[in-house]
Amino acid sequence: MDFLNLKALHIIFVITWFSGLFYIVRLFIYHVEAHKKPSPEKEILQKQFKLMSKRLWYIITWPSAILASIFAFWMLYQNPAYLKMPWMHVKLTFVLALYVYHGICHKIFKELQRDEVKYSSMKLRIWNEVATIILFSIVFLVVLKNAINWIWGVIGIVLFSVLLMLGIKLYKRIRAK
């Protein structure tokens, strides 16, 4: 397969992987919020969220992560010069962070499937933004291919994160009213 076809497939599965990660955490939030509902609403909602989460996780998110990784490794195999580029080292660090994020989401998924609610909906809302930060970081690195100014990039990500957290707190206040 030629490089551009590999790249297209990689991008497609990265998009579906992130879509799955964004939506699974939303389902976690709804599942946790359903835990506070009275019976029988609580049981009905939790059963539905478990089913939706299971389908999303095993039919979309996991396969997308695996396929995105396969096409990424295949591209690096075809063009190993990428591994000598500083921006790629930074990108791969963020990709490693994405794998860790995915793993922690898997842990939360398993807990909720067993009806173990260990996180508040607010903590999960904040957790949901971690994937956004990783996505922004990776996209900017790939498009700009510039790791030299990574310090400014980190500062930008921190500022972006602060704005996201302020937005979440504002949303919480508005919702409380």
Image: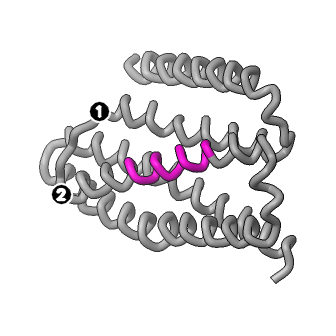
Q: On the rendered structure, is 76 left or right of 158?
A: right
Choose between 78 and 28: the one closer to the eye.
Answer: 78
> What residue range appears in magenta?
93-104
Residue at (38, 61) in percent of width and height: 53
Query: Which of the two residues, 116 or 77, is positioned nearer the viewer here?
Result: 77
Q: Amino acid at mark 1?
A: Ser
Q: CA distance from mark 2 to mark 1?
A: 16 Å
Residue 47 image position (x, y, % from top left):
24, 61
Which element is circle 1 on?
loop
User: Horizontally, is 137 left or right of 128 in the view?
Assistant: right
**Residue 168 magenta-highlighted:** no
Q: What's the residue at 69%, 38% (across, down)?
A: 136
Residue 49 x, y percent position in the rendering: 33, 58
- Horizontally, residue 108 falls left or right of residue 12, namely left
Of helix, strand and loop, which one carries label 2? loop
Residue contact between numbered discs 2 and 1, judged by CB atoms under 8 Å: no
**Residue at 45% in and 31% down:** 126
Tag 2: amino acid: Arg
What secondary structure characterizes most of the magenta part? helix
Residues packed near mark 2 inside 10 Å, few (<14), some (14 to 19) or many (20 plus): few
**Quarter of the image that includes the C terminus:** top left
Residue closest to the eye, 176 or 22: 22
Residue pushed farthest left?
Answer: 39
Residue with the mark numbered 2 = 114
Task: Classify residue 3 by image quadrant.
Answer: bottom right
Task: Name the spot of residue 20 as percent of width and height, x first.
Answer: 52, 58
> What label sits on residue 120 in the rendered view?
1
